[in-house]
Amino acid sequence: GESVGLHLPTLSVQEGDNSIINCAYSNSASDYFIWYKQESGKGPQFIIDIRSNMDKRQGQRVTVLLNKTVKHLSLQIAATQPGDSAVYFCAEIPNTGNQFYFGTGTSLTVIP
Amino acid sequence: DTGVSQDPRHKITKRGQNVTFRCDPISEHNRLYWYRQTLGQGPEFLTYFQNEAQLEKSRLLSDRFSAERPKGSFSTLEIQRTEQGDSAMYLCASSLAGALTDTQYFGPGTRLTVL
């Protein structure tokens, strides 16, 4: 299967600071990537997506950056809030099918 | 609530019993996916349907696992002769094929505990 990994399993940030969560992927043919947020006891929640023909995409307080040269994806959260505490997964979707490949996840803890 | 729903939310069963989980996708979505998630790991793809057709099932963990979507709406995932290793969260997701983005929206999951 595909290999999608995260650099850091845990991240702690102070409330109000910016957070950066990183993800490495292995399939250079992947053309679609999604970041999901998963709170304890709940299913993953869509945050933001990006296609391989883009380098950057912004949402509300979140930005996803894609570096295809090094096969790296990052999620930036501005002015992190306690409600942002969760596990964040990146998902990679190869252009050969509809299967999503998820990494292990990064646990973000926001310190009030 | 028009999101993906799953039933039951929790299931405790004894080893060797059969269990069945139900997923109701977002109503206009034609694709439905099943995943398994163990603690600390990302969701692991199992199978998916487009309408009533099961287009991918090679990732089902064993022949004890089966899924159906008989009318192209709700789906069921059945695990026969459960084992302790089947204990996990079973997630369902749905998407709309042909949309600009085929984003999958997840349900809350069914947590299975096999004693």
Image (cartoon, helix red, strand yellow):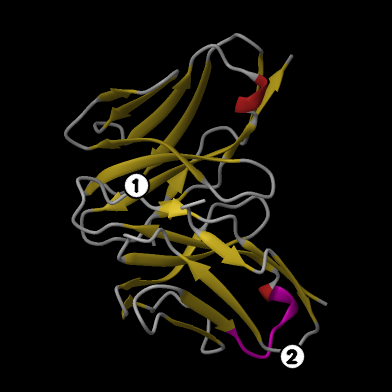
Which amino acid is tagged 1? Ser
- Disc 2 to disc 1, how far (Cα)? 38 Å
Instruction: Using the rendered image of the protein, determine whether residue A67 is visible from the camera's viewpoint.
Output: yes
Observer able to see residue B61: no
Name the element at disc 1.
loop
Residue at (38% x, 85% y) in the render: B70
Residue drawn at x 64%, y 41% is A39
In front of the other: B51 or B33: B51
Task: Relative to B23, say whether A62 is above or below.
Answer: above
Classify A94 as above or below A87: below
Which region shows up in magenta?
A: B79-85
- Residue found at x 43% / y 51%: B105
A99 lies left or right of B76:
left
Residue B82: in magenta span: yes
Q: Is residue B62 above or below residue A112?
A: below
Q: Please tell me which residue lies in front, A61 or A102.
A: A61
> Which dot marks residue B16?
2
The number of numbered badges drawn on the structure is: 2
Check if mark 2's residue and mark 1's residue have beta carbons within 8 Å.
no
Which of discs 2 and 1 lies nearer the camera? The answer is 2
- Chain name for mark 1: A
Left or right for A59, reference A40:
left
| Residue in the foreground of this view, choosing between A51 and B99 | B99
Q: Amino acid at mark 2?
A: Gly
In the picture provided, is B24 more to the left or to the right than B100? right
Q: Is residue A48 magenta?
A: no
Location of mark 1 (residue) = A26
Secondary element type, mark 2 = loop
| Chain under numbered label 2 | B
Estimate the x, y position of residue B22 in percent, counting from the top left: 55, 74
